[in-house]
Every structure is written in C-alpha cells, then in structure tokens.
Amino acid sequence: MAGQSDPQSSVFTAAEMEFLAEDEMIEIVPNMRMEPLNLISGDYGPFRPQIATQVPLWLAVALKKRGKCTVRPPEWMSIERLTQVLESERDSPKEFQPLPFHYIEISRLLFDHARDDIPDIYMVRSLIEDIRDVRFHKVESGLETISARTHAVKLKNLSAMEVNIVRPFVVRTLQSFYKHDSPEMIQQPVQMPTRQPQATDRGPRRDLRRR
C-alpha cells in the first residue's frame, strides 16, 4: 500500500550498532608520547605516558591493538554499580534503569579488545548479561500489553539494542491495528518516540592520519 513502510527497514545490524557505539568517549592511559591527533571527528591528545585522556572508543581500540595504551573501563562497568542496577531492574518490573545508550555494544567491544584491562571480567560479563536478559524480558512483557486502543508507546531508558528490537514489532503491530480500524490511517507510518542512533560520516579517520 502506498505510504506504508517496511518495519524491518529501520532495524540496524549488530555490526552497525557497534559502529555507532564507537563514537562514545572513553578514558585511556597512554604508555607513549605523541602529539595531538587532528582528525575529521575532532582533536585528541596530546598523549603523555601515564596521563589519562578521553578519546572515542574506536581510537581507544586502535591504540590498544598497537599496545599504545591501557583502557579504563567506565564507572558503570564496576561490579558494585552493575549489581545495583541488576537489583533495581528486578525490583522494578515496569521501569528501566538508566544506562549508557550503547551499554551492550560498549561492553562487547571492551570484552573483545581490552579484556586484560577489566577487573573481574567474568563477573562483569555475567552481570551485564543478566541485566540484558531482565531488561529484554520487561520489553517483551511491555509489548504484550499493546492493544487496538494503543495510540503511543513510551519506554523510557531503553538502550540502542533494545530500541532496535522493539521498533519493528511496535510499528508492525500498530499499523495492523490502524489498518483494521481506519484504513486511511496507515498512510502515515507510526514513529516511535524513542532515541534513534544517528550514523555519522567519519570519512577516512580510522587511518589515524592527520589532516
């Protein structure tokens, strides 16, 4: 039907989600001396041994692979903080605890490329997986409440991965209801009132070459 969009067209792949997450800032501790990097996305540095600095995650991974730095895991990845989040998630069946929008992708990248910089990595990984499972279950439970009388869906504090899972299902369901009740309404695709990651053109910045 004219004007009707395919819900699946708004879904990002796992690789695309990680690519978007790589713009998140993270702290590193260089073990080398290097002048500032003037890149398309911004200026980073100067880099001095044992002096912490903030860089995008993609740059942290690139330097880590070359043995040029150690990565400081973000505060929310501590066992104490993750335990607190998990308990709150379990105690609040209808609410989502605030976490970084790309918490799943950030943790996955750090597990893959900076595992030796994460204290108690196995416990941290287990807690994040538990948090993810609890939140996904709440998402599923929330979707079960959608009915023909639903005109909007509000799910606060969802992460990028959770939004990616929810969006096509909600769009398809609401379109089905609207088509059944008022065929003319299907001309306007339903838009979810949630944050959607915006891909940016990074150009050749990953070559780490200066302008």
Image: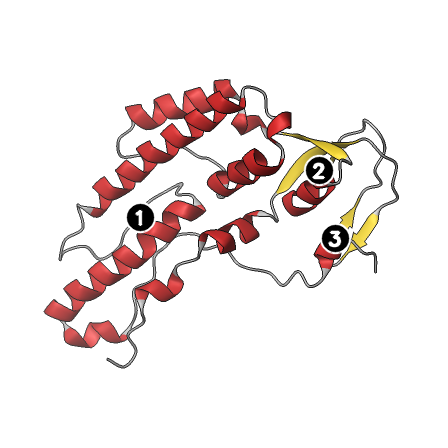
Question: Which of the 4 image quarters holds residue 140?
Answer: top left
Residue 8 at x, y percent in the picture: 33, 63
Mark 1: give few (<14), some (14-19) or many (20+) Cα within 10 Å.
few
> Residue farthest to the left?
181
Q: Amino acid at mark 3?
A: Gly
Residue 68 at x, y percent in the picture: 78, 36
Earlier sequence position, callout 1 versus callout 3: 3
Earlier sequence position, callout 2 versus callout 1: 2
Mark 3: give few (<14), some (14-19) or many (20+) Cα within 10 Å.
few
Residue at (27% x, 34% y) in the render: 94
Residue at (51% x, 38% y) in the render: 108
Q: How many marks?
A: 3
Q: Is residue 30 left or right of residue 169?
A: right
Mark 2: give few (<14), some (14-19) or many (20+) Cα within 10 Å.
some
Question: Which of the 4 image quarters holds residue 185?
Answer: bottom left
Residue under circle 2?
64
Residue under circle 1?
154
Q: Secondary structure at mark 2?
A: helix
Earlier sequence position, callout 2 versus callout 3: 3
For residue 55, say whether it is visible: no
| Quadrant of the snapshot with the C terminus | bottom right
Q: CA distance from mark 1 to mark 3?
A: 35 Å
Q: Is residue 73 left or right of residue 31?
A: left
- Are circles 2 and 1 on residues that touch, CB within 8 Å? no
> Is 34 drawn above or below residue 7 in the view shown?
above
Q: Secondary structure at mark 3?
A: strand
Residue 66 at x, y percent in the picture: 75, 40
